[in-house]
Image (cartoon, rainbow, N blue to C red):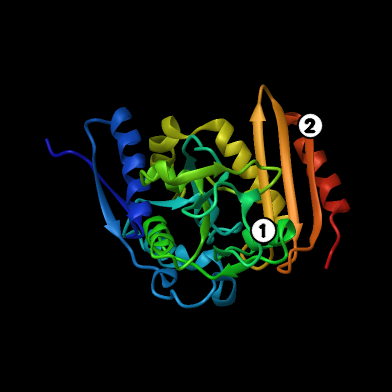
Amino acid sequence: MQKKKWTIGTRGSSLALKQTGIVIESLKHVYPHYDFEIKIIKTKGDTIWDKPLHKIGGKGLFVKEIEEALLKKEIHMAVHSAKDLPVELEKGLILGAVLKREDPRDVFISDVYESLQSIKNRAKIGTSSLRRKAQLLNINKNLDIIELRGNVDTRIKRLKEKKVDAVILAYAGVKRMGFQNEIKEVLPIHIMVPPAGQGAIGIEVRGDEEIKELLRPIDHKITRREIEIERTLQQKIGGGCHMPLGINASIKNDILNLHIMLGKENGDIVFKESFTSPLDASEDLIEKIIKRIPIF
């Protein structure tokens, strides 16, 4: 009897393929009798490397073509970094599962400096993130922020080539790609608030009952709730790649801890606070936060 085969869509980057492999391994553990094949889909974001994301359409550039393949039924599911998913998915698509989250924090990597606090004026820090840029300049207005996009290995290569003095990357990507030994410092969330979804792998599907049931065993309920809270806040604030916005939700023992940072590209911080609340009061907390955040 022929095994049932499921087709998984993903970008072709090293990290995207590594994360797709993690999904397949998780599914194989539950369904050893099924086959899973990878379909690599090139997105617009994979073809434009010389411009900042916020100037060419934001993180949605990494998912549009994959979502189209889902809607055309060319693939059964799509694997994404949850932070790349637009807060509003295409009509007919849902977030079918979220795997257990890796550490959501950012890390500091440098061959010149031992820590973020030790960097000197005019040091060249590589990042393409407005969120990171705002928080870096808030620490030191005299840093030279260098536009740097690409895969984890590409950015570390630029560091080794001395194009920059340091890079700030997501811990999850660095770990999944095996570069933990390069990390000089894991940055505390109150210093560098991560973006919504960082550290989590999301699986997007059409919403067919069979697919939803297939993914149910690997859907990590706590991570999903954290991501839902972060994405709800992001949607209400209206942020993303176009403004420096950090949101991190952490749930433990039904207690929600929230960190939020809203800034400006020049390093001015408009709003930065942390909140603690019972999880079942999260909706009320979100509404209170929205009323307190200034509009600019």
Q: Which residue is mark 2?
A: 277
What label sits on residue 58 in the rendered view?
A: none
Could you tell me which residue is drawn at 65 percent across and 68 percent down?
242
Residue 224 shown left or right of residue 79 in the figure = right
- Judge the density around disc 1: few (<14), some (14-19), many (≥20) Cα neighbours within 10 Å: many
Instruction: Tell me whether circle 2 and circle 1 mark residues in contact (CB < 8 Å).
Output: no
Kind of residue indicated by mark 1: Leu
User: Which one is in front, 144 or 134?
Assistant: 144
Q: Position of residue 62 (x, y in %)?
A: 46, 64
Could you tell me which residue is drawn at 73 percent across and 69 percent down?
266
Separation of residues labelled 2 and 1 (CA atoms): 29 Å
Badge 2 element: strand
- Is there any visible trace of residue 200 in the rendered image? no
Residue 60 shown left or right of residue 176 in the figure = right
Mark earlier in primary sequence (2, 1): 1
Q: Position of residue 212 (x, y in %)?
A: 44, 40
Instruction: Determine whether 11 is above or below 22 in the image.
Output: below
Q: Quadrant of the C terminus?
A: bottom right
Residue 86 shown left or right of residue 63 in the figure = right
Q: Position of residue 9 (x, y in %)?
A: 34, 55
- Judge the density around disc 2: few (<14), some (14-19), many (≥20) Cα neighbours within 10 Å: some
What label sits on residue 136 in the rendered view?
A: 1
- Is there any visible trace of residue 136 in the rendered image? yes
Q: Residue furthest toward the top?
A: 253
Kind of residue indicated by mark 2: Ser
Q: Quadrant of the N terminus?
A: top left
Badge 1 element: helix
